[in-house]
Image: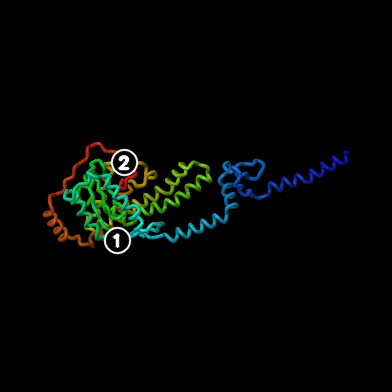
Amino acid sequence: MNVFRLGLASLRRSVLPSSRVAARARPFQPIRQNRHASYQRFPGPDGRQYSRAGPAEKLLFLWANYRPVIIGTGTVGGVFYVYNLEEVPITGRRRFNCLSPETEKQVLGDAGYKDLLREYRGKILPENHPNTRMVKRVVERLLPAVGDLGIETEWAVHVIDEPNEKNAFVVPGGKVFVFSGILPICQDENGVATVLGHEIAHNIAHHTAERISRSFFIFIVALAATALFDVSGTTSRYITELVLSLPNGRTQEAEADHIGLLLMARGCFDPNAAIGFWQRMGQAQQFAPPQFLSTHPTNHNREEAIRGWLPQATTIYESSECGSTSAFVREFKRAFEGPQVSVRRPPQSQGKRNDDDDLW
């Protein structure tokens, strides 16, 4: 019996250490997912659950078990992304956009335009109102530059009687909305051209379609962050907004400033007036979040960027038919078009900035 026990102990010493070393040296080989199990156990003495594993272990698990799906999805997504890359007019920025201008107009423009008309029914100023006529004059001078880009659409102009609302926007499809509260900050037609050049530039660049197109990939990134880092969907959404959406929004706003400045110069509006407008806009607002938390650049950064684009805009302004004779003809026509524009100034109390608005 003693001999048998000694032999058994010797056998254990000869076998167990080697098996332990082999277990430690064996590379990570996750067990394939059991669809009927409540969670996937990882190999090892601790038997940790998938939800408790680290991001690296989860990546290894997904790669080992779903490699064909990951490769196939990534290949299709990459081809789809590259196929839908395009250049923004004027600036030449490369961006992903999978919505055509026709789809953008039909899905977002037409329905949105009808909703806005219903929402502001009774507040839209009549066609013969001085403010409406002034805004229309500005739009008519900006449109030839839009036509030079080969963009044809049915434009419509509406001025909304909202003295406390300092904003303007253009619905996809060329429907212009201007709130009366921004007109005192504009002061004159050059200021209005700064605002509308910016808003029409959003329409030219199809920024709305770009944001929707990017939202597909942002949604996928948010899902991946939720799965790998075991965070809530709300947390992952905030992170992706901060890292992906907000920087793209600031890029679009700066691009609209650039294109809009060139549009107003082409329409014989003084591009230097854009700096004065943004200075007045900065004085009119009481609250502004830090730039990294906003979809818009700060007014100071906008001014600095505009100063850098001014030489290009000035060249366009001087080469266009903006000489003294043309200016005299425009003033002569304006004298017979009706009385000068009168703007109702808003009360002294100013509302807080709404970062969801386009201009702010």
Q: Quadrant of residue 180?
A: top left
Q: Position of residue 168 (x, y in %)?
A: 27, 48
| Screen quadrant of the C terminus | top left
Mark 2 crowdedness (10 Å alpha carbons): few <14, some 14-19, many ≥20: some
- Circle 1 — which element? loop
Residue 41 visible in the snapshot: yes
Q: Position of residue 87 (x, y in %)?
A: 38, 60
Which tag, 2 or 1, sits closer to the chain's start? 1
Residue at the image position 57 percent from the left and 53 percent from the top = 66
Which disc is residue 151 wearing? 1
Q: Nearer the viewer, residue 69 or 140?
A: 69
Q: Amino acid at mark 2?
A: Arg
Inter-mark Cα distance, 2 to 1:
33 Å
Residue at the image position 52 percent from the left and 44 percent from the top = 229
Q: Nearer the viewer, residue 57 or 274?
A: 57
- The residue identified by callout 2 is 353
